[in-house]
Each structure stands twice: as C-alpha cells, then as structure tokens.
Image: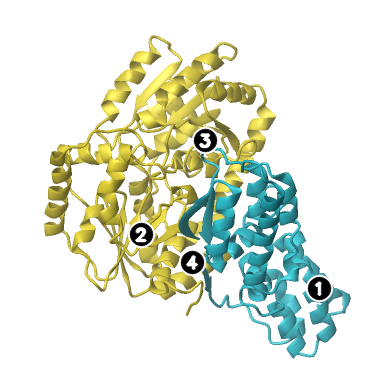
Chain colours: A yellow, B cyan
Amino acid sequence: MESTRTGICLKDYEAIVGADVLDELRVVADCVRGRRLQNINSTAVGGGVAEILTRMVPLLRELGVEATWDVIKGDGAFFEVTKALHNALHGKPEKFSEQMYQCYRDTTEANLRQMELTDDIVWVHDPQPAGLIARKRDAARWVWRCHIDVSSPMEEAWKFLAPYVEQYDASIFSMPDFAQSLPIAQFMVAPSIDPLSDKNRELDSAYVAQVLERYGVDPERPVLTQISRFDRLKDPLGVMAAYKLVKRRHDCQLLLAGGGAPDDPEGEEVLREVKEAAGSDADIHILELPVFSDLEINALVRGSTIVFQKSIKEGFGLTVCEALWKRKPVIGGAVGGIKLQVIHGVTGFLVHSPEGAAQRASQLLADPGLRVRMGNNGHEHVKQNFLLTRHVKDYLLVALALEHPNEDIVHLC
Amino acid sequence: MQLTGRSARTLHELLAALREVPGSCIFYHTHHLFLSHHFEKPIVYNEFANWVSEALREEALSEKLAAIDLMAFTSIRELREAIVGLIEGSLAMNSGRPRECPAGDEFHFCRSKSFVMATGVTAEDVPAFFRRLPAVTHVSLYFHFLEARLRLERKTNDFSQWLQWRGEVELAESIDRLDPYVVTLDELKEQIVELGRSRGIN
C-alpha cells in the first residue's frame, strides 16, 4: 500500500470535521496572514513533535500563513544532555555536570551561527532548542512550546532551563497541570493527530491482516498492543507484567512496537531489557520499526483488540488519540495528557499499576460490547477535541493573542 | 485557554486565589464546560463546585456552589463575591483541620481569552433571524447569550437586545427569561427557535 502523504489539502478534511470548522479556520488565518511563523525543534523524524509539524506546516501554508520549520543540529553528547534534561524535567533524578551544561550552550551557539531567525513569530518546541532565545530580536515574538510534563521537575534541571524560558514572550503547555509559575503568559494547547495521515487514515482489512501476519501476529486471536518508543517512562516492562497476568485466563498476544528517534539515545538499552523480560514466549512480539513505518503502525493498531499506553510520566501521549481514533479502547496510565484522552469508563480505563491494567484488559476481553462502545466513544472524543484542524486554529489564535496581551476579549478583522 | 500557573490544594488556597485571580478566571471555570463536548449532559457546569466535591469531599459547600443562579448576576464582580461568600461561610462553620486534595487533583486556575469575529451569518429582519438561527454555531450562541450578558455586562443577551430594537419587545423578554444554564447549547437554540415558531415567525 502506498503512502498518501502528498496531495492532501484542507478541503479533504471537510468530510471529517465539517465545512463550518474549515470556514472558521480560514477566517482566523486571514487575521494572521502576512506574518512568518518559524518553528524550531530538535528532530525532523520520530516523536510526536516532528509528526505534528510535518502535517501542520503545509496546512498553515495552504491557509496563506508563511510557516517554516527548522531543526537544530547536535551530536550524540548534546542529545545525551537533552535526554537527561528531558527525564529530569519529568521528575526523574539525573546527574548533571558543568561540562553537560557547557555542551548545551556550545551546541546552542553553533546552531545560532547557522540559523536564520524571523522577526515575526518563533515557536521553539521543547527544551532542546530553548537556548536559541539568546538571539531574540526586539520586534520578534517568541513562544516556548513545551510538549512535556514539567509540573514536578527535578529542581536543578528547571533551574537551568527557567532563565531561558523566562525570556520568551509566552509559553504553551499541553494541559493545565503542566503550567508553571512563570512571569510570562501561558497558554494551553492540546496536541493533535492528523486523521488523513498514513498513521491514522482508514485501511482495508486485508492489508491490516497482511501486516499482522508479516510480523508473526495471529489476526484471529486477541492482540494487546502498546506502540511507543522503548523508553522507561512508557513502562514497557509494566505492560509485559500486565500481559502475563491476563494470559493466565485469556488467550492473547502482546505486541510492543516502537521506533527510535535520533534525540533518544536511551532506547537501545530499554529494548534489550524488554527482550530479556519477554523470554521465550512466542506470543510476545517486540518490533523495532524504522521511521516511515506509519502505514504498518496504523495497521498494527487497527488489528489490535486493546491498546495500552501505560506510561509512568507522559507529556501527552498521542498514541492514545491514534488508538481511540481507530475505535480501540485504551488502557492508559493515569498521568499527563493520557488523563485528557482516556475518559475513565467511557473511552477506556485509567490505571495505576500492572495489576490494574491486567484487570481492565481482562474485563474488556470478556466483554466485546464494551469494547465497541468505548471504541465509538473514543473516536468521537478525538473528533471533538484532538484533530489537526483544532490544533492549527489554536496556534493561530495564540499568535494573535501575542499581539493583544492585555485583552480578555479580542475583536478580530 | 490561558493558564495562570496558580493552583489550589485546599479550600483556603482556593479562597485566596478566588479573591485575586482575574475575572476571566471566574468566567472560565463557571462557563467553559457549556462549550465542551460531553457524552452525557453534565450535572454541574460550575468547576469550583465539581472540584470541592470530587477533590475535597466538601459536599454541602459543593451543592451551594452548584446552586448559584448565574442568571441572577450581570457582572463577574458580583459572581465572584457570591462564590467567595459561600466559601468563607463554609470555612467559618468548619473549624476543623482543612482537607487537602490528593496529589494530582489540584485545582488549576485557567482564564478565558475570547476572539470575536464575524461568522458571515447575518439577519436583516426578524423572520430572517429565526430562519438562520439553526445554522448558528455553538460558539456563536455562547458568545451572544452567555459572554455578552455576563462578561460584557450587557445585562441581557444580544438576541433579546436586537429584537427589542426591532419592536419585538415581548419576544425579546421571553428569550431573556430562558435559562441557558440548565440546558445544552443545542437545547437553548431549539428553545429560541420554538419561541419564534410559537409566534408564527419562521
């Protein structure tokens, strides 16, 4: 099956979200036209931010907004530092040295020498490129878009990052719980999925079965799945523990599939631990998917019975939305953005332990009607709240809000 | 939605914040659920009432907060005073150790920032108004009925004001008497359409 990435335009979303949503989007975009929106992050592929920007930037351009996307460059040492920073901002204890901080500063400086920065609006995504604010020109407005949960960070990590963040004009967090006490404006914008992307579009059932079989998964038997990077914060070992409890009473398979990202050097180590824990169980399928495996991931989720996202910490966890969109009930860790996506008992279940996850999985395996109801609710929940069109509108509105910092009600156009 | 970075774990902290946060916070937490999609109609739209019940288990206070008649207010200042008054009263009655919410259940203060733009839907006369009303979006209805009255302190909703200017005084008053806080926005729209229909306007 071929990718449909090319040729998608705004009009294609009308059948999903309705004409009124697109009309509203065009009106808001008209008010932003003429300004350049420059996005900067740390990776062009892999991870939620790159996925969102891949879809969002073309849509913004079609709406007449001059959107651009730059990726900072860094070596292995830099990404080791930013991974530690990422973990520590999530609250995981990490050790930092002056050498690590200097590596961050030097890489930031090297990127600044190469990067052309706009005088209009700059969106900097996550901590890796946050230091670029050093070169902010007076006329430009800079927004720090934080995709991770920084509600209870390791103090040392936040102390390092905060002086950068405080120089921005505004920050954006994915949910209210992540907001910080900051001297700058803070907005909430939930991330989104693209219903027309290869990862989310409808697939025919023959292709779904073919992909499952290609990876050795039996399409005729229940499949419990977690699609995530091999990252300790995603708790793949907890998912495996839950599967082993379920397996005592229910015939089922476990599918753990994930890809790496260039800015995540810890992945290989976690993958090794997961393989070790799986032992010789032939019903456990651990897949390392290369980047650009979106169609396969789509098929694997569509072929699943239940989807897990049993994270211990989570920025948002868009894999939840991706599963809900495909009408799969989701069992998610009660953390971060998962709490916004999994409405307990409505679109899935929120759990706090492998035992809880196992109990809910058993409940769902025993009740096909419940799976269908939760699946349908999940699809509607995503349609109402987490699609790309809403996300684009929110970004445009934040851009406008920067120009009206002191008004609670802004009259446009 | 704008975030404030301010949160509360106890009734005392909630009260202290309520006295200081911008009016747009009070409006947000008493109104934004009307715009959200729900699988079941919420029993209570007031988020202060919901939090006091769910996180602090202060059920009596929660009931009183939920029972605040938003139609009785035409300014956020008055609404804030009413909420603050109820919490002060509750704290005065209960001298025991104040309850603290579980970690992760803190109340996070947010604020509304609204953008107003023309939708392109216009009515040149009263019959056209009722013909086009079904096409009006939730957001538009929310602005003209809820924000206009309380946040912009126009004392009535925009529809009633417009109808009054066109001499439809009785109809304007009937619409003004509708309580938008006990129905969904779809139900509210249907009630307005029905009022027009009952007067032979369609």
Q: Are tags 3 and 4 found on a single chain?
A: yes
Rendered image: mark on residue A24: none
The residue to which callout 2 is attached is A58
Cα distance in 3D space between marks 3 and 4: 33 Å
Distance between the Cα atoms at labels 2 and 4? 14 Å
Q: Which residue is mark 4?
A: A25
Quadrant holding the N terminus of chain A = top left
Residue at (17% x, 37% y) in the render: A97
- Kind of residue indicated by mark 1: Arg
Q: Amino acid at mark 3?
A: Ala
Residue closest to the far front: B95
Q: Nearer the viewer, residue B102 or B43?
A: B102
- Measure how far apart labels 1 and 2 are at the Cα level: 47 Å
Q: Which mark is residue A334?
A: 3
User: Do dots 2 and 4 share one subunit?
Assistant: yes
- Front in this rendered view, residue A9 or A41: A41
Give the label, 1 or 2, closer to the camera: 1
In the figure, B13 relative to A37: above or below? above
Q: Is residue A369 left or right of residue A160?
A: right
Q: Residue at x 35, y 30 (%)?
A: A231
Both labels 1 and 2 in a single chain: no
The amino acid type found where label 4 is placed reads: Leu
Q: Mark 3, mark 2: which one is toward the viewer?
A: 3
Q: Are marks 2 and 4 in contact (CB under 8 Å)?
A: no
Q: What element does badge 4 sit on?
A: helix
Which quadrant would residue A216 be assigned to in this image?
A: top left
Residue placed most toward the observer, A331 or A159 = A159
Instruction: Indicate the quadrant where residue A355 lies.
Output: top right
Closer to the chain start, of discs 3 and 4, is 4
Residue A24 located left or right of residue A104 = right
Find the distance from the CA under tag 3 to the CA under tag 2: 34 Å
Amino acid type of the residue tagged 2 in the rendering: Pro
